[in-house]
C-alpha cells in the first residue's frame, strides 16, 4: 500500500497568546478552520493546500489577533515568503488564505514585521 502524502502550499498560524485571545483569536481560528474545511482549502482535502495551526505569541500583542503565513515563493526557486498581519478579522484572514492557496500576491493591509 502506497502512503498518501498531502500537499501543503502554505502554513497559516493564528496567535493564541493571552492578548490575542482577549481580542477574539480563538473565534478567528475556528472560523478560518471552518472556512478551509468548507471550501476544501485544507491540505488534507482534495485540491487543498493550506495548513492551519494555533500559535503562541507572534509579537503584536497590542494589535491582535495576529496571523502569520509562510509559503514557498510563487514561481519556485526554493525561497520562503512570509507575511505577518495584526488586527486580523475573518474577512482579511479569508483573503490571506485564498491568496496563499491561489499563489497570488498576499494582501498588504494590516501587514507588519519582516518583509
Image (tube, rainbow, N blue to C red):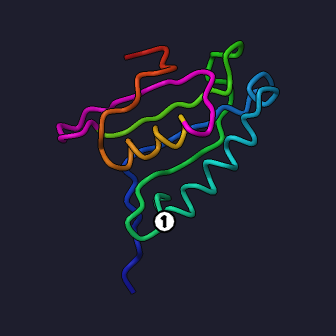
Q: Please tell me which residue is depicted at 38% across the width and 43% down the height of the picture.
A: 100
Q: Which residues are magenta?
A: 73-91
Q: Residue furthest front?
A: 91
User: As displayed, is residue 40 above or below residue 95?
Assistant: below
Could you tell whether 48 is left or right of 92 in the image? left
Quadrant of the frame with the N terminus: bottom left
Quadrant of the frame with the C terminus: top left
Res. 47 image quadrant: bottom left
User: As displayed, is residue 73 above or below residue 36?
Assistant: above
Could you tell whether 102 is left or right of 61 in the image? left
Residue 113 pos. (x, y %): 48, 14
Could you tell whether 113 is left or right of 19 in the image? left
Whether residue 10 is in magenta: the answer is: no
Residue 58 pos. (x, y %): 61, 23
Total marks placed: 1
Local secondary structure at mark 1 = loop
User: As displayed, is residue 90 above or below residue 22?
Assistant: below
Q: Please tell me which residue is depicted at 50% across the width and 61% down the height of the picture.
A: 39
Whether residue 80 is in magenta: the answer is: yes
| Mark 1 crowdedness (10 Å alpha carbons): few <14, some 14-19, many ≥20 | some
Viewer-side residue, 82 vs 107:
107
Residue 57 pos. (x, y %): 67, 24
Residue 72 pos. (x, y %): 31, 40
Q: Which residue is mark 1?
A: 44
Amino acid at each position: 500500500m502506497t502512503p498518501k502524502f498531502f500537499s501543503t502550499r502554505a502554513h497559516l498560524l493564528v496567535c493564541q497568546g493571552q492578548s490575542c485571545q482577549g481580542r477574539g483569536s480563538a473565534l478567528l481560528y475556528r472560523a478560518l478552520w471552518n472556512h478551509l474545511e468548507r471550501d476544501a482549502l485544507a491540505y488534507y482535502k482534495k485540491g487543498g493546500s493550506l495548513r492551519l495551526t494555533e500559535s503562541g505569541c507572534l509579537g503584536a500583542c497590542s494589535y491582535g489577533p495576529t496571523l502569520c503565513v509562510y509559503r514557498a515563493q510563487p514561481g519556485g526557486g526554493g525561497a520562503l515568503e512570509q507575511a505577518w498581519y495584526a488586527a486580523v478579522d475573518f474577512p482579511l484572514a479569508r483573503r490571506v488564505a485564498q491568496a496563499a492557496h491561489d499563489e497570488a500576491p498576499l494582501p498588504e493591509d494590516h501587514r507588519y514585521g519582516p518583509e
